[in-house]
Structures are given as C-alpha cells and as structure tokens.
Amino acid sequence: MLDWITGKGFRNSLTPRVCAMVALLIGTAAAQQDAGTFFKQNCTSCHTIGGGRLTGPDLKDVGSRRDRAWLVQFLQSPKAMIDSGDLYATKLQQEARGVVMPNIAGMNPQQAQALVDMISTESKLPRSQFAGMQISDRPLTDQDIAKGRLVFLGEQQLSGGGPACISCHTVKGLTLLGGGRLGPDLTRVYERLQGRKGLAAWLSSPASPTMAPVFKDHAIQPEEVLSLVALFEDSAKRGGQDDTTSLLNFFLLGVGGMVLGLISLDALWKTRFRGVRRSMVHKNDRGEG
Amino acid sequence: MNVRSQVSMVFHLDKCIGCHTCSIACKNIWTDRKGTEYMWWNNVETKPGTGFPTRWEDQERYKGGWEKKNGDLQLRSQNKSSALFNIFHNPNQPTLDDYYEPWTYDYQNLFNAPEGADQPTAKPISMVTGEYINVEAGPNWDDDLGGSPVYAQNDPNLESLTPEQREQLFATERLVFFYFPRICNHCLNPSCVAACPSGALYKRGEDGIVLLDQKRCRGWRACVAACPYKKTYFNWSTGKSEKCILCFPRLETGQAPACFHSCVGRIRYLGVLLYDAARIEEVAKLPDDQLIEGQRSLILDPFDPEVIAAARASGVHDSVIESAQKSPVYQFVKVWKLALPPHLEYRTFPMLFYVPPMSPVMASQDGGVIDHVSGDLFHDIEQSRVPVAYLAKLLGAGQENKVRYALRKQKAVRWYRRALTVGDVTMEVASRMLAEADCSAEEAEAIYQLTSLCTFEDRFVIPPMHREEAIQMMEDPLEHKASAGFGFVSAPHRGM
Ligand code: SF4
Ligand code: SF4
C-alpha cells in the first residue's frame, strides 16, 4: 500500500523487510546506523535538541534530568514505562497532552545507548543541528493559505515528489467530497500538534509508521511546509468539527450515481425481452386489444 | 453429394382431434421430474392461437432461428461477440410466465379438512414454490378458444391476412380452429446446435436426432433463445437445458416414440429420409419463395441408384436405405407434396412436416336446400374458413400455392373416394378434379390407404438403428471386449 503511494511498486517492497532481517541477524549492525540519521528520521517530528518543546519535550541536557539507564529503558518501550506506573513517564505523557511516544522500529539497547550519547554531545554544542526548523512567526497571509490549498489538493506537486495530502487526508470545507480517509482528518491538526512549531516539525519529517516510509525519500520542502501550516492554521481558526458532511455527501453521491446508472441502463436496453403473456392479456383487459 | 439418413416425421393435421394424449404420454415418460414440470416436449396448440410459450412465433421478440444478413446466415439471437458479452445473462429468454407456472392441487385437504358448512376444495399449489397460487395461465390455456379476442386474435400468423379476412375469421358464424401438435423438429440446420457455446447439442450422425448432452451442458441457455420453435427448455433444478429426444431409446428397440405410439387420431407418421448434407448451406441461403422447393431438393430419391451408391459410400447401412424406400414420410413430403414444414422461413429446416388441415365446408343455402356442391369444384378451398394465406404463413413459408396444391389434392382424393363408395358424385367429376389437382387414380388410392386405413406398420417404418455401427465411429468395441459390460457403478473388491 505504502509502496503504491510512493510509486515504488511491489517489486521494491521487499527491500525494507530484507534490511530488517539483516539487521536482526547481525545484531549490532543497527547500532552502527548513524545515531544522527536515526534521530533525524525518527525523532525530529516530536523533539528538538535546544529548539523548545514540540509534541514531546526538548531533549537538550536530558541526561541531567534522568539517568542513562532510565533513558535507555524508556527509549526502547515508552508505553511499558508508563504502564509500569513510572511517575516521571506519566508526567511526560501529561505534558504531551496524553500523546504516548510510539515504539520506534529498529530501536534496541545499542541504538538507545548511541542515541543518548549523541544527544549529550549535541547538547553541548551552542546550536545543535537538531534545534528544529525555524519557522517564521510572521502573520500568514491569504496567499500562503491559497498556496497551501494548492499543495494540499495536489494541484501543485510537492517538489520532493511526495504524494499530495488529499490522497489520504481531508480538511473540512476544502472540497465537496472531502479527501482521503486513510489518514486522520486534518481540520484541527493545528491544535493537536500544538501550533506552528509542532506542525512544521511533523511536516518536515513525518514519523508515523504510515507516513514515514512514504516521505523518507521525498521530504516536504520548507516553503511548502509553511504554506501547509498556513492552511491548517486557517482551518483550525475557522473552527468547525471534523468533517462528517463530506462523508454523507460521498454516500449520497454513490446512491445517486447508482440510481442514475440503473435508469440509463434501463433506457439503453429498452428493447430487452420482458415477457409476453402478461402484457398481452392485460392490454386486452384494458380494452386495447 | 454427402448422403445422410434422418428419422423424419409427418403430422396429418386433418386427423388431429386435440385430445392431448400425446402430450401426456411424453410427460409421463420424460418430464415428470423436478425442474421439468413446466416443460411440454410435446404440446398441442389451438390455431389460431398464441401457443406455448405465448406467441412463440413472434421472432421480433423471441429472436429465434436464422436470418439472412449480407447474403450470409446468422443467428437472430446472438453473434460471436454478443454471445460472449451476454454469457452470464442470456437475454431473450421466455419467462416462466410465458410458459406457465406449473401447479398441482392440494388433494390432501379433501380428506383432512375439518368438518364445516361447505365442501372442502383442493386449492392449486405451485410445483415450483410449493405455495398456493392463483392460476393465471397454462400450457394450453387457449385450448379450443378459436375466436378468443385475447388469444386467437394475438396469433402472430394473422399478420398475413387482410383486414377483411381477419374480420371474417372472427365472425361468430364462421368461427374456426384446428389443432397443431408440436415436438422438436430435429431440424437439418438446427439453430439450437449452432448457438450452444459449450458444444453440448449435436445432431446424431446416423439418424439425425438432435440431442443435448447433459454432461456438457453448462446452462448458458443460448439454445433456449435460439430455437425458433422454443423446443429446448431450461431445467431449473439441474441447471441444464433439456429437449425432446424423439424417444431414441424406444426407436433403438424398434418402437415408435411415445407420442407417436399413443396418438389417438393416428395422425403421426415416421420414417427415414435420405438427404444431401453437402447442399444444406447453399439451400439455406435461398430467398424465402424458393425455400420449400430447396428443402425438397435436399431430400433424395432412395430408389435412385446414384443416391444408393453415395449413401453406401458415406456409411448408410443397406437396411436403412431399404427402410427409406418404404418411408411414409418420403411419400407425403416428396412424392405427393402433401406435407409442408412449419415456418421454413426460420431456415432451420424442420424435419417434421404437416399435412395442412381442410376447413369445415361452407354450405350455401338456396331456399330450403342446403347445397355443398358448386360449379367451381375447389371453391371452398378459396373460401375456406381458415384462409389459405394463414396456412401459408404457418406451413408454407408464405407460399400460398404450395398450401393450395396440398389442399386441392386432398379434396380431390375425398371426391374420388366419394364417387367410388357413396356415389353422390360422378366419377367423371372426380376424375376432372384429380386431373386438376395433379393426381392420378393410383396416387389417390395410395393417399387414401395411408391416410385412412393405415396400420401401425404403415405409419411407423422404423429403421434398424445400428447402434453397434454408430458407436464404432467413436469407440472401438474390441477395446471393451475383456471388460465388464457397461462398467461398474462401484467395482467389487476382494475381502469384506
Ligand atoms: S426444433 Fe429442435 S432441432 Fe430445431 S432448432 Fe428447435 S430444438 Fe433445435
Ligand atoms: S394424440 Fe394425436 S390426435 Fe391426440 S392431440 Fe396428440 S396428435 Fe392430436
């Protein structure tokens, strides 16, 4: 499915699986994956290092907040930590408005160690490469929104080559029939991801298991991110609940289309055989015989 | 010349009394199974009338038979692409309502009903659904309803009549009808066979009987649409189509088919015809007005040495040739030209021929004297209650002269016999009539014998079927020599 979306085709869909198997076999091989790259691909949508909080907390100097063992354990299975009743983990969840950090594919003790090392190194730099995207604070104009609309609908192709948002998502009021239903409704995503910054970070490197492989090699460029943020900000400001009318429209269109189809088939095939006797006898009963 | 033999039939309509014994004989043997209740491989229709299924002759709607397009023969129901396109939903099928919903009666109620003020009745029950039904139609619903405004007036053959003729046909004092028994015609150019996508239908090489292989049939129902006589039927229980088999198991044992054997009016004749298979296609493309002569030309003279030699060459057994020489069908169709094929314009070349019926004589009243004789001796043929045009539409592919010829000859034979036995007509008048009707005294005598005094053996000249030879075309009997007869249903095993 995902490969279909990225247009890679079924032939290549084996590659990630093969990689995963090789990784498992060699064991430490995953640790050899550069921690920086791993962080960039998996973490930056929710975390910065010295860039302030997004969905998850800023990780600058996280080593001073919790000890290494805790961090390594948490990284491998955040949900298990929360479930175990760890107070700090629960607090983190509350701060993130209930969002639980997902288990990250390819995470293992070695990788976690490497990440903790990398974060502490980056924390010492005056400005980390993971300080996050600096999205401008200027008020977003109607032009930005209009451009965001084009990008969302796919009328303007993403320059990275990724699929248009509408293939999986919908935003209320954007189109008559709404967009795709595979991904979540994005009408209020601006609020869910806590504003411009979170949204921009997510868009720059979407981390959900569905989106990550699709956009891994087709990153959304900064100008496009800005326009999309403008669009989402606008739609959240207008308020409105998630889009259910378009679902109804879609259903009604389906029913209407079917009725129309049947009527036109009937008209097209008017001369078909429908039986002889009954009409003959009834015609006579009515005195037309 | 490619000589083949075909078991062919003649129905003498002048003798049919419309008793439906034939239909019942067939039903009891072949179609009293589940799924076949509605089928009447043999049915008897009242003409003018709409028949079974209703208005089956209306090919504008049922799309049966062949039509000539750009000089070529094509099925009306389908071509290659439309057959493929419609394979899962074959159009032009008669609905169950066009046949009828078969029913029985709730006889139990006559015995089991609780005591009440009224006599209990046996209500009709559908044999398809098992529910009580309101009977609206039956396979011979218009039986004897010659003047019925619903049925008789919707007979597709009335197209051939002028408005006056139609009016006269339905004038109360002239009301008329005759019976028209029908079975599968075992055609020479069967459209049912041509239409079958599975190749389940075939015309038996040795006797021309058209059969439907139940193992090969896939229930596409292309044959049901394609047969213009609507003589293949779909069995809703087995999901396969079925048709008249001309009682081949009876024929193979020297017995006449059940409907022939039981016929009360003794209207049915059966015998072998030799025909030229090489010329079928050429003849099938002739214009309508040459079709009757064309079909007659396909039927070969079994006494002609050339024909006999060719027949032998293509494997027709001597005993079959001998049987063809005695065939009553050959006499009626080819020698006397009395019997005509039904609706030859469908171009399937039916091998069942009908002797057209004589209408009741219209008497002329002169004062107190009722007179049956007029100056023009054949006058009542022209003014007969059933117009010649109607019979020509039904039996003559539209050619009135062919029907007129058959009627005049029959009439001449009657008058000849009257002169001989009753004596109210002079032989001189009778001879004049015979001459005018292209008939010699010997021929008249022979027609009289085969029409009125025919024995079982005269009517049914059943050829030895030589199954043992026919089977050799497909299998080598020696292969089966060391095996057990027809094989085992379940083979015996040593031990308990
Ligand atoms: S009458 Fe019999 S042989 Fe002729 S087309 Fe119909 S089913 Fe076939
Ligand atoms: S049994 Fe003979 S006489 Fe009676 S209806 Fe049938 S064909 Fe006619």
Image (cartoon, coloured by chain):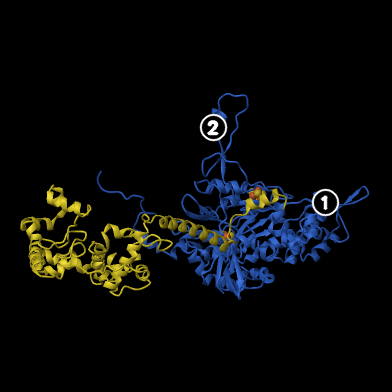
Chain colours: A yellow, B blue
Left or right: B178 in relation to B171: left
Q: Which mark is residue B108?
A: 2
Of the image marks 1 and 2, the number of the one nearer the N terminus:
2
Provide the chain ID for the residue under circle 1: B
- Quarter of the figure that contains the C terminus of chain B: top left
Give the residue displayed 68% in from the left and 47% down from the top.
B143
Q: Which is more toward the observer, B433 or B72? A: B72
> Which amino acid is tagged 1?
Val
Residue B281, horizontal then vertical, whole percent: 58, 72
Chain of the residue under the numbered disc 2 shown in the image: B
Image-based side of B386 in relation to B81, left or right:
right
Percent position of residue A213, x then y: 24, 66
Please tell me whether mark 1 or mark 2 is closer to you in this view: 2
Q: CA distance from mark 1 to mark 2?
A: 56 Å
Q: Quadrant of residue A43?
A: bottom left
For disc 1, the neighbor class at 10 Å (few under 14, some 14 to 19, many from 20) is few
Query: Badge 2: few (under 14), some or many (20 or more) residues near its Cα, within 10 Å?
Result: few
Regarding residue B18, the answer to whether it shows in the image is yes
Q: Camera-side residue: A47 or B288?
A: A47
The amino acid marked with disc number 2 is: Gln
Q: Residue at x 36, y 73 (%)?
A: A156
Q: Which residue is mark 1?
A: B422
Residue at 19%, 53% in the rendered image:
A95
Which of the 4 image quadrants contains residue A272?
bottom right
From the top left corner, tell me how far across and down residue B194 is, in percent: 53, 66
Viewer-proximal residue among A215 and A279: A215
Disc marking residue A52: none
